[in-house]
Image: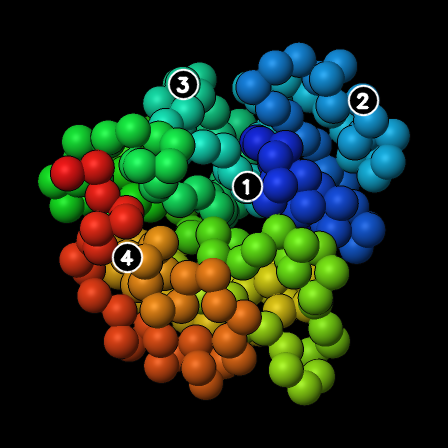
């Protein structure tokens, strides 16, 4: 597949490495120039591009940047992807730790719904709760004991099927976590966030989640 990744931090860089290893054609971008990604490009064989070019003709687009920087993305940032190509966002809202207050989220808008609104495209939420080092090193073949499960929120259909397949290729069990409207079930502070649960425990943790933001994860 052709995969465009916007963001080359811990999660974006890890996904660049892993997806390139799997044989996918990866274009990657950060907030600066392609030249600043020369080392990662040489290491992985991925192509460094400007952010506005990353989604061009892509079968899948991944956005992995600080939440506060989403409004800075160019208008139509994912519009050049192939028709129907899904968009994954791995972001988390860290109001006290990094992002400051985002009023719409504090007023109750779900984090991923806010991202979708900013970029003008529906999204799938996945990879937001796994430590980057485990994403890099802890993938296992399907059926292996203690395989980590990752919740995937988003609409049903071919896009979800593709996202689930990518999660499986990376060595993790995808778990249907409902629509984006319920992606609060995997936001920071939820029972599943930051945990390396298997499928059964992931399903249980998602069911036990509350939409109320906990004190650590609010600016108010």
How far from the left and from the top, in percent, is residue 201? 44, 82
Q: Quadrant of residue 98?
A: top left
Q: Quadrant of residue 116?
A: top left
Residue 125 left/right relative to 52: left
Please name the residue that numbered disc 3 is placed on.
72
Please name the residue that numbered disc 2 is placed on.
38
The disc, 2 or 3, on the residue closer to the chain's N-terminal end is: 2
Distance from Cα at disc 2 to Cα at disc 3: 23 Å
The disc, 3 or 4, on the residue closer to the chain's N-terminal end is: 3
- Helix, strand or loop status at disc 2: helix
Q: Is residue 118 above or below residue 203?
A: above
Looking at the rendered image, the disc whose residue lies closer to the viewer, 1 or 3, is 3
Tell how many labels: 4
Distance from Cα at disc 4 to Cα at disc 2: 36 Å
Image mark for residue 40: none
- Helix, strand or loop status at disc 4: helix
- Helix, strand or loop status at disc 1: strand
Please name the residue that numbered disc 1 is placed on.
62
Distance from Cα at disc 3 to Cα at disc 4: 23 Å
Mark 2 crowdedness (10 Å alpha carbons): few <14, some 14-19, many ≥20: some
Q: Is residue 125 above or below residue 218?
A: below
Please name the residue that numbered disc 4 is placed on.
184
Q: Is residue 193 visible?
A: yes
């Amino acid at each position: 597949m052709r995969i465009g990744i916007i963001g080359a931090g811990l999660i974006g860089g890890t996904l660049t490495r892993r997806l390139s290893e799997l044989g996918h054609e990866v274009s990657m971008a950060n907030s600066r120039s392609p030249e600043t990604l020369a080392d990662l490009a040489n290491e992985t064989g991925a192509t460094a591009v400007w952010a506005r070019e990353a989604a061009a003709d892509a079968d899948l687009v991944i956005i992995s940047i600080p939440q506060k920087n989403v409004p800075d993305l160019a208008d139509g940032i994912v519009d050049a992807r192939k028709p129907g190509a899904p968009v994954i966002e791995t972001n988390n809202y860290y109001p006290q730790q990094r992002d400051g207050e985002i009023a719409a989220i504090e007023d109750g808008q779900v984090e991923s719904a806010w991202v979708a609104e900013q970029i003008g495209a529906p999204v799938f939420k996945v990879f937001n709760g796994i430590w980057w080092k485990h994403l890099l090193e802890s993938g296992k073949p399907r059926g292996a004991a203690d395989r980590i499960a990752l919740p995937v929120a988003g609409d049903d259909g071919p896009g979800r099927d593709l996202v689930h397949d990518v999660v499986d290729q990376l060595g993790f069990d995808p778990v249907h976590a409902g629509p984006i409207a319920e992606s609060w079930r995997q936001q920071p502070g939820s029972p599943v966030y930051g945990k390396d649960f298997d499928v059964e425990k992931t399903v249980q943790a998602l069911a036990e989640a509350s939409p109320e933001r906990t004190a650590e994860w609010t600016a108010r």
